[in-house]
Amino acid sequence: MSPTAPSMSYVSTLAQVSAETGLFRQSIEEPNKFKSSQSTYKGRGIIQLTGSKDNTGYYNNPGTYKDYADYIGDQSIVSNPDKISHLYFILMNIVLTW
């Protein structure tokens, strides 16, 4: 019996996660010159959720954080955005993506 090739969905998800996390080394966007890294809802988690821009150009509106919080029924993510970088939510992002 030959092994089954992984579906493109798995391959695509792993490729995106690898790119978003610097080869699985980080789950929070590092500070840099871009406004997204200096924002309340900066990239966090394995899929790097990022909020939406406000009128200053910073990502201080919940955006996808709110969408994700609504989807899993946990609004504490909006009030505590660092929570998304915890291991439980990292794993939930992967499971929900697949």
Image: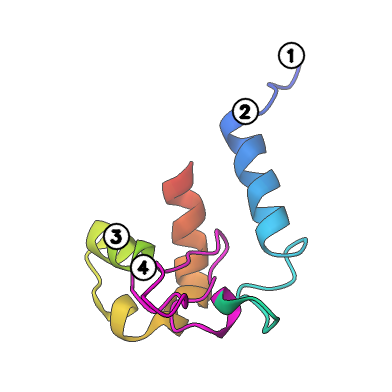
Q: Residue at position x 57%, y 63% from top?
A: 46
The amino acid pointed to by label 4 is Tyr
Disc 3 on helix, strand or loop?
helix
Counting from the top left corner in percent of width and height, residue 28 is at 60, 76
Question: From the viewer's perspective, is the residue at label 4 or at label 1 nearer?
Answer: 4
Q: Earlier in the sequence, mark 2 or mark 4?
A: 2
Disc 1 on helix, strand or loop?
loop
Question: From the viewer's perspective, is the residue at label 2 or at label 4 nearer?
Answer: 4
- Asked if the residues shown at circle 4 and circle 1 are in contact, with their CB atoms under 8 angstroms apart, the answer is no
Q: Residues within 10 Å of mark 1 (few under 14, many from 20)?
A: few
Task: Magenta stretch: give its range.
Answer: 36-62
Asked whether 20 or 57 is in front, the reply is: 57
**Residue lying furthest front:** 55
- Determine which of the numbered discs, if any, sits on residue 1 in the image: 1
Residue 94 vertical placement versus 66 (above, below): above
Does the magenta segment cover residue 43?
yes
Kindly identify which residue carries mark 4. 65
For the residues marked 2 and 1, what is the alpha-carbon distance in whole angstroms?
Answer: 21 Å
Kindly identify which residue carries mark 3. 67
The amino acid pointed to by label 3 is Asp
